[in-house]
Amino acid sequence: MKNRQYITARRIVSWAKWFVQQEVTSGDICVDATVGNGNDTLFLAECTGRTGKVYGFDIQTTAIEKTRQKLNVAGLLDRVTLIQDSHAHLDMYLESGTVKTVMFNLGYLPGGNPSLITKPESTLQSLRVALKLLSNGGLITVASYRGHPGALEEFTKVNEFLSSLNPKEFKVLRLEPVNQEHIPPVLFVIQRHQ
């Protein structure tokens, strides 16, 4: 019998990347709002091609440096601007209506200090700003991890905020496993109407 990889076994971050791949093309402007270890930043730099641009945000020096090293090894550092600042300040660096995709991974830096987490207030502010930055058809992915202290509060506030968006302007999808033993992450995908 053939060994298969079930589509339902995909990790949330893999689903986020799949959605982004459906929309992003060479030359687009994209944002990694929480660079962490640089995996999404690298992915976006590959998606946008030589003519695109990626902006990566993180408040931690460690995250910025790890991401810089990863991009340098891949030869893609010239496609990315790394900014050590809160994702709540995206609009200080980007113009409204110019961004094709914004990716968020909420929680803490994998392998880093688990007490340094994304907070509901700055995350909601960042989402409000990101919605304004989106071009027509642009999308936001939010991977919300719910297993660490403070995570359920952030998830609840993000869920309430996204559920309240005007459906004539934005479509919001929530993707989550429902039969897991632990508290699984949730993926939100928000797309601006064209």
Image: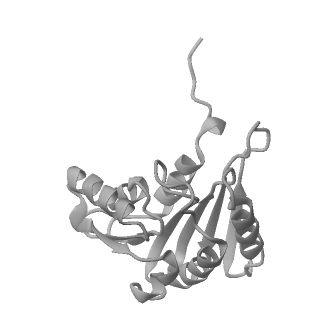
- Nearer the observer, 172 or 58: 58
Q: Quadrant of residue 99?
A: bottom left
Vertically, is 87 above or below 14? below
Quarter of the image that includes the C terminus: bottom right
Vertically, is 26 above or below 14? below
Vertically, is 90 above or below 27? below
Q: Does residue 16 appear left or right of residue 52 in this picture?
A: right
| Percent x, y of residue 57 | 41, 71
- Nearer the observer, 72 or 76: 72
Q: Quadrant of residue 78?
A: bottom left
Q: Does residue 157 appear left or right of residue 129 in this picture?
A: right
Quarter of the image that includes the N terminus: top right
Q: Quadrant of residue 16?
A: bottom right
Q: Does residue 148 appear left or right of residue 55 in this picture?
A: right
| Percent x, y of residue 56 | 38, 69
Q: How is the image coloured?
A: one colour
Vertically, is 29 above or below 65? below
| Percent x, y of residue 83 | 35, 74
